[in-house]
Image (cartoon, helix red, strand yellow):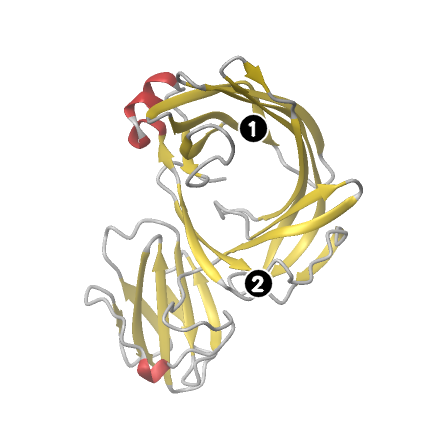
Amino acid sequence: MPVAGDTLRYSTAPATTVINPKDSGLSMIWNYALGSVSQGIDTYLTATSVNPAYGAAMDPAAFGHKIGDSIGGLLPVYYPYTFFQNTTDSFIATALGAEASGTPTPGNYTKPDVWYHFPLTYQRTDADTFSLNFDVPGTGSITQTGYRETRADGWGVLITPYSSGIRCLRVRSAIFEMDSVTLGSIGFAPVPHNTVEYKWLANGEHYPLLWVTSEVTGSTETITSIRFRDIVHDTTTSHPVDTPIAVQNIKQCNNSVSAYPNPAIDGMITLTLPDTWKNQLLVVLYDIKGMEVSRYKDDRVLDMRSFPSGIYLARIVSGTHTAYTKIVR
């Protein structure tokens, strides 16, 4: 689960990517042809750091991220943040904060939206109702009520451009929601909004390795969003995430990042990184052809003893920081 201070990067894959929601069960191997069309970052901040008005009205443990630039509809509501609390028993959405009619406005759930109950284990099933009433000063209000059914319906190995063979728990959440708006003294009829979210969760990762959202109409699910946990990619060209990079032409660097001994003496390389790089560390190693040959997570020592002699490129990612360094094996 995310924590306050996380900056978690993801890539967006085309919604037309072939993914079968029925791929569930034990000993699964999920391997989808995921390509990146864009990237984004979910930054999780304390309520107070987003706006003091939110911090004063919400639980001190609340933290959240911006979910968009506006809430579409009749009311002037912009820059909404969903705030969460992470406890030993559950991960829950507890509040919404947004600029409503130009005023930073907090709104606590009258009944929190429980995303997960812990311990989250295979075949665990939970169902919870939620309720939120958000007042827009001098204009009206937004009400959301509904329930969430969550089942951990799969366990196996996920293969993505970021995660190669990581064991994951797949969680299916069906969200049945009614949204209603009051404008002055006029109340509009509630509008149903039904979605299903599929998330592949792994120990040590603060963000789903894969996150698929479907809109539900009747008994039909239509995939509308596919995200996967990722590292930063070159944005100067539009290419699939598995396209080889040009190792010899890499120009991005960081003078405070280095590798030693270089050339490697016994195949073991140690990276020197800035002390400020404290977020989860990912090192992706490429060969001279620009093809990925290995990944290291939260490890500054690279074991290259089994690799052929030659030139390699290490791409190092920590939060929003990225650097490259060449290594001679």
Residue 239 appears in the picture as rendered? yes
- Res. 42 image quadrant: top left
Direction top: furthest residue: 185
Query: In this picture, is 62 found above or below 5?
Result: above
- The type of residue carrying mark 2 is Thr
Residue 265 appears in the picture as rendered? no
Report which residue position mark 1 lands on.
Answer: 90
Of 94 and 238, nearer the camera is 238
Using the image, tell me which numbered label, if any, was put on residue 160: 2
Q: CA distance from mark 1 to mark 2?
A: 27 Å
Count of numbered marks: 2
What secondary structure is found at the residue carrying circle 2?
A: loop
- Res. 304 image quadrant: bottom left
> Which numbered disc, 1 or 2, marks the residue that appears first in the sequence?
1
- The type of residue carrying mark 1 is Ser
- Res. 217 image quadrant: top right
Query: In x, y percent, where is residue 221?
Result: 73, 47
Query: In this picture, is 255 found above or below 12?
Result: below
- Local crowd at mark 2 within 10 Å, few (<14), some, or many (≥20)? many
